[in-house]
Image (cartoon, rainbow, N blue to C red):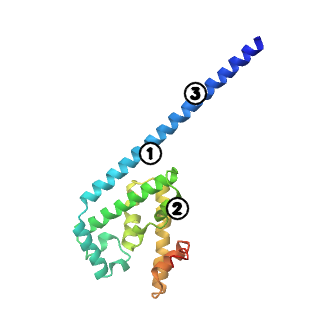
Amino acid sequence: MEMLADFGEVAVGLAVVACLIYVGYQLRESRSQARADTLQRRLDTRIRTWQQQLEVETLHSAKDKFFEFELYREDAALHEIEELTLRERRALERELMIELTYFQNLFYQRTHQLIEPADSLPLDYMRCFESAPQRRAWKDQIRLTNHFPPDFVRHADTIVKKYDEVERRMAADEDADFSAVVADVFDLPAPPAWIS
C-alpha cells in the first residue's frame, strides 16, 4: 500500500512538473508572438507614414526623367545625377526606404516561419534594386544608417551583387532579354508549362 502511495506522489509530481513546463512553453510562445505582432505593427506604421509623406507627382517626375535621359544607365548615386531636383532625389530615396522596409517585414516573417518561403519569393530578387542608382543608394547611404538587421543587410547585399551581374551581362550583350538574364542570374525556376 505504501508503495502505491509513493507511486501516486511521484505521478502527481510528474504531472505538476509537466504542467509547469507546458505553461512555461505557452508563455514563451505568447511572448514571442507578442513581439512579432509588435514588430509587424511598427513596420506597418512606418510604411504607412512614409507613404503619406511621399510626394507621388515628384516621384513620377523623377521616374520620367530616368527614362527620358536614360539615367538608369548611369552608375551614379542619386545626389550625383544633375538632372534630378532635390525633391525628386528625396522622393526616390523615400520610395526605396518603403520598399526596403516592406522586404524587411517579409524577411522577418520568413525568418520566424510566420510565412512559407514560397509566399515570399519577391524577397529573393528584391525588384527595388533593379536600377543602378537604387543599388548605389543602398551601398552608399542606407547600409550606413544601421537601420536594418545584419542578416537582412547580408541578404540585400547578395541581391545587389546579383543585379550588378545582370547589369554587366546586359552591357556585354545589349540584345539580351532583361527578364531572361535576371532569371538566369537569380536561378529562378522556369514558369509552369501552362503559363508559357
Q: Disc number at residue 102?
A: none
Query: What percent of the width, then of the height, locates residue 195?
Result: 50, 76
In this view, 49 is above or below 167: above
Mark 3 and mark 1: Cα distance apart in space: 24 Å
Q: Which residue is mark 3?
A: 20
Q: Residues within 10 Å of mark 3 (few under 14, many from 20)?
A: few
Asked if the residue under mark 2 is in contact with the one under mark 3, i.e. CB atoms within 8 Å, the reply is no
Asked if the residue under mark 1 is in contact with the one under mark 3, i.e. CB atoms within 8 Å, the reply is no
For the point 46% across and 88% down, the residue is 175
Could you tell me which secondary element the residue under label 2 belongs to?
helix
In this view, 5 is above or below 192: above
Q: Residues within 10 Å of mark 2 (few under 14, many from 20)?
A: few
Indicate the amino acid at tag 3: Leu
For the point 49% across and 81% down, the residue is 169
Q: Disc number at residue 36?
A: 1
Q: Which badge, 3 or 2, comes first in the chain's sequence? A: 3
Task: Specify the farthest residue to the bottom.
Answer: 175
User: In this view of the protein, which residue sits in the foreground, 1 or 185?
Assistant: 1
- How many numbered badges does the structure rendering display? 3
Q: Quadrant of residue 59?
A: bottom left
For the point 75% across and 15% down, the residue is 4
Position of the N terminus by quadrant:
top right
Q: Disc number at residue 118?
A: 2
Q: Which badge, 3 or 1, comes first in the chain's sequence? A: 3
User: In this view of the protein, which residue sits in the foreground, 116 or 106?
Assistant: 116
The reply to whether residue 86 is visible in this rendering is no
Query: What percent of the width, then of the height, locates residue 91?
Result: 27, 65
Indicate the amino acid at tag 1: Ala
